[in-house]
Amino acid sequence: AWAVLLLAIAYVLVINAPLLFLINRFRGFPMHEAIETIAGKIAGKAALFVYALFFFFCYAACMLFTAIFIDLYIFPKTPVWALLFFMVLPAGYAAAKGAGTIGRVAAFTVPFMLFTVALFFAAGLEKMDFTEFLPVFANSTFVKINIGAFLTAARYSEMLIFFVFAFY
């Protein structure tokens, strides 16, 4: 699995390179104007609709994955709908207040998240099985590793958020 994640980094760069080019090319344009300039009025609206659906599904998937993780490992007796409700409230508030609120909240939450990841990593060191790093191709082939890396890289949609906020 570790080889898949390392290869996924390269795929993320390859997948997002065209989008980074567009962000630089249309700097100062809102996302809808840039897409309508590229694709035209009607096709641009269709592309924006696809982007909106993509953002919604990414948001829904992230919320569901987070709720399932919290439900399984942290609060197993709490219903999933309650977890989702308390995740949607702050996200909805931040979205309603705009990009500035998201940036101010990120200044607090990002260091907290990094500290949490480091803490869980340090706490789990004794349970780690380092023999997993041994032969990469023992249970899989090069093609399977590439497919897994591509599917992992396809989930990283944060670059689209840069496209939305490039105007600000």
Image: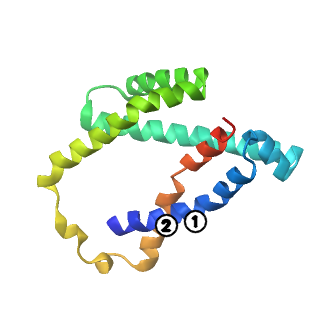
- Counting the numbered discs, the total is 2
Q: Secondary structure at mark 1?
A: helix
- In screen coordinates, is 47 left or right of 60? right
Depth check, front residue: 82 or 42: 42
Q: Amino acid at mark 2?
A: Ala
Badge 2 marks a residue whose secondary structure is helix
Residue identifier under label 1: 14
Q: Are marks 1 and 2 in contact (CB under 8 Å)?
A: yes
Residue 130 horizontal/vertical position (percent): 18, 65
| Category of crowding for the residue at label 2, using alpha-carbon neighbours closer than 10 angstroms: few (below 14), some (14–19), many (at least 20) | few
Q: Residue at x 39, y 66 (%)?
A: 6
> Where is residue 88 shown, x and y percent of the image?
48, 25
Q: Which residue is mark 2?
A: 10
**Residue nearest the observer in this picture, 51 or 24:** 24
110 left or right, relative to 53: left
Residue 48 at x, y percent in the picture: 74, 42
Residue type at mark 1 is Val
Is residue 148 visible in the rendered image? The answer is no
Instruction: State how far apart marks 1 and 2 are (Cα).
Output: 6 Å
Of 139 and 47, nearer the camera is: 47
Would you say 29 lies left or right of 88 here? right
Q: Residue at x 27, y 39 (%)?
A: 116
Residue 95, placed above or below residue 114: above
Q: Which image quarter holds the N terminus?
A: bottom left
- Is residue 27 visible in the rendered image? The answer is yes
Q: Position of residue 32 (x, y in %)?
A: 77, 40
Quarter occupied by residue 97: top right
From this view, report whether residue 15 is shown above or below residue 27. below
